[in-house]
Amino acid sequence: MTKKQLFGICYVSVWVVLWGSIGSLIDLPFLNSGIYQPASIGQATTFTVTAIISILLAVWLYPKVLSFPFLVAALGLDTES
């Protein structure tokens, strides 16, 4: 496994944790106020919408993150391969 592949796996893992955390923070007030119940379509919609936004943001940011020279140098990433 190359360093770039390992970086990609770590990048996606960080985004999954961010998505779950942000989705949960958005979900909590809806559950506490009784707008919807756990395991309802409302909760599924909340996590689906936050997932779509997270995916779009992660894909948009990936090339920008790889353009940081200090990151490429620090991790020893070869962006040409």
Image (cartoon, rainbow, N blue to C red):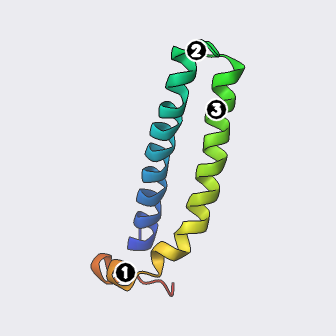
Place of residue 69 in the rendered image (x, y in percent of width and height, measured from the top left): 38, 85
Q: Secondary structure at mark 1?
A: helix
- 37 or 74: which is nearer to us? 37
Mark nearer the N terminus (2 vs 1): 2
- 34 or 51: which is nearer to us? 34
Place of residue 58 in the rendered image (x, y in percent of width and height, measured from the top left): 56, 60
Place of residue 25 in the rendered image (x, y in percent of width and height, measured from the top left): 47, 33
Q: Residue at x 42, y 52 (%)?
A: 14
Q: Secondary structure at mark 3?
A: helix
**How dense is the environment of label 2, judged by Cα within 10 Å: few (below 14), some, or many (20 and up)?**
few
Q: Give the spatial CA distance, label 3 vs label 2.
A: 11 Å
Lateral position of residue 3 relative to residue 34, left or right: left
Q: Residue at x 61, y 67 (%)?
A: 60
Q: Amino acid at mark 2?
A: Pro
Question: Which residue lies under the disc numbered 1?
Answer: 72
Place of residue 73 in the rendered image (x, y in percent of width and height, measured from the top left): 31, 84
Q: Give the spatial CA distance, label 2 vs label 1.
A: 42 Å
Q: Amino acid at mark 3?
A: Thr
Mark nearer the N terminus (3 vs 2): 2
Q: Is residue 39 above or below residue 71?
A: above
Lateral position of residue 64 relative to residue 69, left or right: right
Q: Amino acid at mark 1?
A: Val
Question: Which residue lies under the disc numbered 3?
Answer: 46
**How dense is the environment of label 1, judged by Cα within 10 Å: few (below 14), some, or many (20 and up)?**
some
Please say if the residues under marks 3 and 2 sit with CB atoms less than 8 Å apart.
no
Label ID, residue 38: 2
